[in-house]
Amino acid sequence: GGPASFDPDSAVHCGFGAGRLALAENLKGAEEVPMDRVLQHLNGLEDESRGDGILQYSDDTAMTRCVVQSLLARAGFDERDMAGRFAVEYSQSPGRGYGAGVIQVLRKLASPNLNDVFQPAQAQFSGRGSFGNGGAMRAAPFALAFSKIADIKRYSRLGAMLTHSCSLGYNGAVLQALAVHLSLQGALEQPDEFVRKLLLEMEEVEGEDVARSDARVLNQPEFPFCKRLHKVKDLMERNNVSIEEVISELGNGIAALHSVPTAIFCVLHCLEPREALPEHYGGLERTMAYSLALGGDTDTIACMAGAIAGAHYGIDAIPQAWQRCCEGAEVADINAERLHTLYHQALTEG
Ligand code: F2R
């Protein structure tokens, strides 16, 4: 554990790659995907002669790349730069499967007359803001660029608020970034401690007035992400838990609340070998297969679980065939190295 084991490559690659593993087989949207079908698809990727070709990335990766490029270009967080990159990326490649609401924000962000880059997100859903998981799906790089928890919380929140101004959206991004950070620190060696640390941080995050008020207005219990993390703990303690129960307790939808805790559960559940999964699979492969079998917003859940698991297992745990079939894998490699340098600069500058 500790920063010495920092392996940005795997976190970047897994987050970038996982979504495509789902999309390639149209697993997204299905309520639950039979594990046989998931395994058949993943096995097919090992067989180069089958020639699946390059799997195109979706909005998850497109926006994560923008976050990475902005953090690197500005050597830190710069909201105007990041917002501009989101807008350019969308205008150049609008068909990556963006959410129906967020595309309005991305169009407004392209306007040269825009003074406040947070304003378009604030106007969404009659001023309530989006609670979708679009901020969380691109949050991993904040944990790869910043070493201090306070910075990770602050910038993952601001980065998400460029498109998601509802606390049930941006707090999902904070939770995802914290999970990647703790995973990089080796915290998954002690799963109970990992959840305890997440709860400690999220109790502070969700104790803010705005989070309490959003939860009330949206008919959610107080501390909604903490409540879900407690459910994650309960499910972890059970010997047998079916995929149906995971979906019913944690969700598999496009809301951050119904997908970020689910992704965290996937990682924790797959730390151990599981009966339904091949014995020869390592933890990272188990996490990917399990996330894909959940169906629903499977590419985004797999993307988030992949980033957390990748930070724990390291780049060598990702099968070569999976890496080879991902569009943009080489760029991910280069950017991961550069993020590593930025992270260490921040560490030495204190
Ligand atoms: N949904 C997709 N892909 C489907 C492709 C649709 C595309 N237009 C096409 O047909 O090609 N993927 C993406 O959606 C998930 C969430 O993304 P994001 O960025 O959070 O999107 P958005 O639009 O902000 O929110 C998604 C939907 O959630 C509902 N919603 C959010 N906040 C709401 C609120 N305050 N009140 C009511 N509803 C709210 C809306 O239905 C939004 O459209 C990711 O998987 C991403 O990959």
Image (spheres, rainbow, N blue to C red):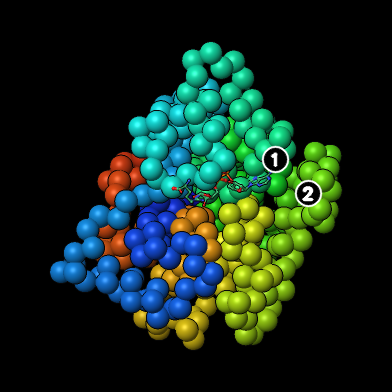
Residue 20, image x and y in percent? 37, 57
Total labels: the figure holds: 2
Residue 8, image x and y in percent? 43, 49
Residue 4, image x and y in percent? 47, 51
Quarter-wise, where is residue 321 in the image?
Answer: bottom left
Q: Nearer the viewer, residue 224 or 298?
A: 298
Q: Indicate yes or no: mark 1 CB to ligand 1 under 8 Å.
A: yes
Residue type for callout 1 = Cys
Crowd rating for badge 1 (residues with CA inside 10 Å; few <14, some 14–19, many 20+): many
* Pointers 1 and 2 in contact (C-beta within 8 Å): yes
Q: Earlier in the sequence, mark 1 or mark 2?
A: 1
Residue type for callout 2 = Leu
Mark 1: which secondary structure? Answer: loop
Which residue bears the numbered disc 2? 218
Q: Indicate yes or no: mark 2 CB to ligand 1 under 8 Å.
A: yes
Instruction: Using the rendered image of the protein, determine whether residue 200 is visible from the camera's viewpoint.
Output: no
Which residue bears the numbered disc 1? 166
